Image (cartoon, grey):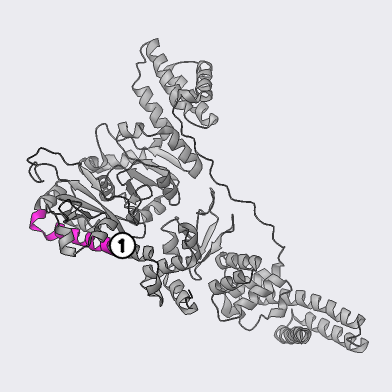
Amino acid sequence: MAISESEIAQVRAATDIVALITETVALKKSGRRWSGLCPFHGEKTPSFSVNAEEGRYYCFGCRASGDQITFVREIQHLDFVDALRLLADRAGIELHDDANAGPARKDRQEAMAAMAKAVEWYHERLLKGPDARGAREYLRSRGISGDVARQFKLGWAPDEWDGLAKSLKFTEKMLLATGLGFVNKGDRRQDALRARLIFPIFDPGGKAIAVGGRVLPAPFGPAPRPDGRVEAKYKNSPETSIYSKRRTLYALNWAKDDVIKSDEIIVCEGYTDVIAFFAAGMPRAVATCGTALGEEHFKTMKNFSKRIVLAYDADKAGQSAAASVYQWERQNEVDVYVAPLPEGSDPAELAQRDPNALRSAIGAAVPFLQFRLDRVLDGANRATGEGRGRAAELAMAVLAEHPSDLVRDTYLMKVADTLRLEPALLRPRVAELVRNPNARVTKESPPPLQPGPLRARTPMPRPGLEALRLRVHFPHDVKGRLVSPYFINEVQREIFDGLSSDKTISEVVDELQRRGEEEASQILSQLAVDEMERDYTVEDVTAVVAQLIRGAVREEMKNVERDLREGRMTPDLADVTVRDVKERLGLLDGDRAEEAERDLRDWLVERSSARLT
């Protein structure tokens, strides 16, 4: 299947590469470029750079590079056509052969469109439906205004068997594909959610992919059912082709900007907790969607912030799988903290009662290990030797779960001071618990993938690289002043020749890759995102061009000597040529520099053309 170059170029031009990548990776403006941690290999110092103007990215660590299409292919493991179609859908561009798209892709598109319609339908029902009065009153009782309800697209599922399915004319296939409904035993289409407050769930790009529904508590909700059956408090969409619970974080689409700005992400238990954080002036909160915090969530969060704050109530935070948390910390190079919320308070309740207390709790967040130890020590009976000994046993079990011996020993000293015990008495017990895996719960996971060794590259002449940087970033300043024979390095010459065409940088990279010119495509990808330390003056440009010419002339004089030895040039002509060229080289730094540059350019082009004929 062939897609025209013009359509590919149209999709690239319509896709903001910074907006695309920030759905996966936190980027910060750095001069003319955007930079962040590379999503393709683990690193602590940002080496991933994005050129928004050219639509290119490059990692100086693992050398991953590409454009918008490449990024989608690598992140979502798609082939070229599927990645292109995804971006075309995103930009509202219809490709000429969309009719030939695969069934799975069409089904996914239809499911996304149906979910978007459902979210709007639920939202309008909440805002205007007479039957949603109780839901609106409940939201007001929780401090959620109409403006907030609109911001989060909250909705209302009426207490009807098929209100949604009937109004939007959803087929059985569409109800099942979205998880919005099913066909009951009476062979009738039925809504999955009834009499529930709706919390739409969006992907990081802001597209609706699922919904969560909450029953209304008394006195706001419907009367108890005659059969006495109690509905679950929350009910979420099932896993579908467009929704994966283990990868999705509620409100990340709204929170990511403040997460990047504050370099902190707050993880809550429920949807209303997230909304409460936004209302309290901390719009960087997210929540899992009906599932426990897991490895895939950490993989997502690490791309936006290295500081993760758990804002659960104390009991649930303490019950988190410690071994897994430490493993995820190590694998993803993040730091997990716990906010010390007041006993018996959840973020939603605390935000409504005392938003300053909620903000203070986040500011006072402590490392996960410290939080767990504090829970043990605060509950200890330190008045007796037996009480301190029992607390020490519990504390040593907590310490043994941490994989770092240095971290363990640091906190061991704190435990010893608190319980008035000698550290020498505690260390053997910790060592024993560490050696005996049956003494504590662990979760063995494979080590994180490490980037492969970097391939050695041919040393690049500095003047050629500087000239190519100018050609990429300041093309108007060097227009007409650079020619192919100036580039004595073959790879640099290939790049220049590609840039001399009417193609974009991405198109040149594609062409180089098609020809198997890997090194050239890598260098151009890097040049596209290189941050220029300063703007070049006319004098700077002239100096670079002069250096380039001198290098090219030195190489060409070797060809003159070879022509003389092999009889292709007479001694007289060779002497005249050498004197003439040396004279013009001497003029490059004087008042006649422009004339000398022109003459030497013409001579180099003529010599190059003669060799090709």
Question: Mark 1 highlights which residue?
Answer: 112
Q: Position of residue 310 (x, y in %)?
A: 36, 40
Compared across the picture, whether 520 is left or right of 302 comes to right
Q: Is residue 360 above or below residue 511?
A: above
Q: Position of residue 98 (x, y in %)?
A: 39, 73
- Name the residue furthest top: 385
Q: Position of residue 474 (x, y in %)?
A: 57, 75
Q: Quadrant of residue 86?
A: bottom left
Compared across the picture, whether 147 is left or right of 600 comes to left
Which residue is at 52% across, 26% downward? 409
* Residue closest to the eye, 9 or 496: 9
On the question of residue 253 being in view, the answer is yes
Which residue is at 42% across, 50% downward? 300
* Residue closest to the eye, 403 or 170: 170
Q: Quadrant of residue 156?
A: bottom left
Q: Does the magenta stretch mainly form a helix, a strand or a loop? A: helix
Compared across the picture, whether 314 is left or right of 595 comes to left
Q: Is residue 413 magenta?
A: no
Quadrant that contains the C terminus: bottom right
Magenta residues, as a range? Answer: 111-132
Q: Position of residue 511 (x, y in %)?
A: 59, 73
